[in-house]
Image (cartoon, rainbow, N blue to C red):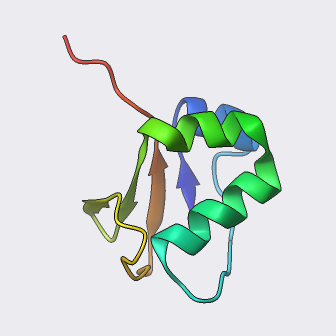
Amino acid sequence: MRYFAAAAESAGVEEERVLVEPATVGRLQEDLIARHGPGMARVLRNGSFLVDGVVSRRPEQALGVQVDVLPPFAGG
């Protein structure tokens, strides 16, 4: 699991190994909020997950080998 920008700040690390069962985006999101608290909840509210290179916000999405937590990005 890799964290970027505000996600890394909320987690306090840029990378960590996380195992969750069942291995879904929804379960991972619950685990990360329990682990890292309200700051991570704010990031995940509008952020997304990159699962093996594909953006996902669907809770039922199965996790892959590499998961990145992406904070919301501002356009411009």
Along the line of sight, which residue is nearer the eye, 56 or 51? 56
> For the view shown, which residue lies furthest in the top direction?
76
| Quadrant hosting residue 37 | top right
Residue at 56 percent of width and 36 percent of height: 43
Q: Relative to residue 13, is residue 51 depicted above or below?
A: below
- In the drawing, does residue 22 fall left or right of residue 48? right
Residue at 54 percent of width and 85 percent of height: 23
Q: Name the image quarter holding the N terminus.
A: bottom right
> For the view shown, which residue lies furthest in the left direction?
76
- In the drawing, does residue 34 fall left or right of residue 19? right
Residue at 72 percent of width and 44 percent of height: 11
Q: Relative to residue 2, is residue 6 depicted above or below?
A: above
- In the drawing, does residue 12 fall left or right of residue 48? right
Along the line of sight, which residue is nearer the eye, 26 or 73? 26
Along the line of sight, which residue is nearer the eye, 41 or 16? 41
The image position of residue 6, as x and y in percent, is 58, 30
- In the drawing, does residue 49 fall left or right of residue 35? left
The image position of residue 39, as x and y in percent, is 71, 34
Residue at 39 percent of width and 78 percent of height: 60
Q: Name the image quarter holding the C terminus.
A: top left
Asked if one can make out residue 16 in the rendered structure from this viewpoint, the answer is: no
Number of marks in picture: 0
Asked if one can make out residue 37 in the rendered structure from this viewpoint, the answer is: yes
The image position of residue 49, as x and y in percent, is 41, 56
Q: Relative to residue 46, is residue 34 depicted above or below?
A: below
| Quadrant hosting residue 31 | bottom right
